[in-house]
Image (cartoon, rainbow, N blue to C red):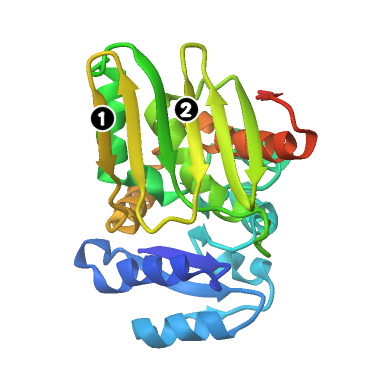
Amino acid sequence: MFRVGMLGTENSHALAFAKEICFKEEYKDFKITAFYALEKAPSENIIEKCGITDAVIVDNPLEMMDLVDCVIVTNRHGKYHESCSLPFIEKGKPAFIDKPFTIDPAEARNILRTAKQKKVPVSGGSGCKYSPQILELKKLVEQDAFGRIYSGVLNFPASVESEYGGLYFYASHLVEMTLAVYGMDVKAISAFLNNGHITAIAHYDKYDVTMQFANSKKYVSVIYGETDVDIRYLDMSGIFIAEFKDFVDMVRTGKSPLTDDQLLIPVLVMNAIEKSLEQKKIVRIDR
């Protein structure tokens, strides 16, 4: 039995993951044993909705150290992600760290460096990269299905005004989808703010990809290729299921489903978007 600690339960994602554990027969070897959040009410809500009878709510994350084998960190504000996850990683416990992985490149590097030293698998970030259309587009781009790519566009909402870390709270979704499809080797970012709307351009060696952080009700990808113009809407309905399965597989096998770059580069890109907005210039990705 793998005992799971959930930290940052104020996020709705925590309830989605808890339901996977509590109501799916294929995860009967997982059990939630401890909760932590800045307030107790969100944890109490999960306990009630999932019918959990023997888990504890702790006042300090360290109080659950001996009660769990792995952790799911879902704090809304990414500033808490390193402090909530690192003590458990240092003790050899696998960690899922929800989006944004962190809001600080130095913190992301510290988590990954510690995980490597301790030989502990970590995963996380946005679940949007598990959209079936994103996974399909990734394969098609890798196979050169569109011939030479001239440019691409994707959209997903985000705002610099969020109380949970501004841009970082939601930007990870679009950034990670873009990187999943077009690759991690983005060179630079230029970003613009117009009437509250953010547009960011990911500059690759051979093309540019526009990220529209539009508050739209539908999400779409457009690829302008040599052989075709590919337009498709993006379905997010099953992303929590796919993301949680990867977490379960990681804990069972001891192997992360994601590379260090897949966890680090989105943080670097978001940091570059923020700097580009502030400095009003192209910002290179500092690896």
User: Can you tell which quarter of the image residue 83 is in?
Assistant: bottom right
State left or right for residue 253 relative to residue 4.
Answer: left
Q: Which residue is mark 1?
A: 230
For label 1, count other residues whose C-alpha is less than 10 Å away and answer few (under 14), some (14-19) or many (20+).
few
- Which residue is at 64% across, 45% downward? 194
Residue type marked 2: Val
- Find the distance from the CA under tag 2 to the CA under tag 1: 14 Å
- Please state the horizontal and vertical placement of residue 136, each as a whole percent of the image: 24, 34
> 70 or 8, which is in the foreground?
8
Res. 125 visible in picture = no
- Which residue is at 33% across, 27% downward? 223
Pick the quarter of the image with the C terminus.
Answer: top right
- Which residue is at 47% across, 39% downward? 176
Task: Say what secondary structure mark 2 lies in.
Answer: strand
Q: Residue furthest front?
A: 195
User: Can you tell which quarter of the image residue 81 is in?
Assistant: bottom right
- Please state the horizontal and vertical placement of residue 56, each as a whole percent of the image: 53, 81
State left or right for residue 60 relative to residue 12.
Answer: right
State left or right for residue 163 relative to residue 36.
Answer: right
Return the disc, 2 or 1, that comes first in the chain's sequence: 2
Q: Which residue is mark 2?
A: 209
- Please state the horizontal and vertical placement of residue 195, each as a whole percent of the image: 64, 51
Residue type marked 1: Asp
User: Can you tell which quarter of the image residue 135 is in?
Assistant: top left
Res. 260 visible in picture = yes
Q: How many marks?
A: 2
- Which residue is at 46% across, 11% downward? 206
Picture disc at residue 193? none
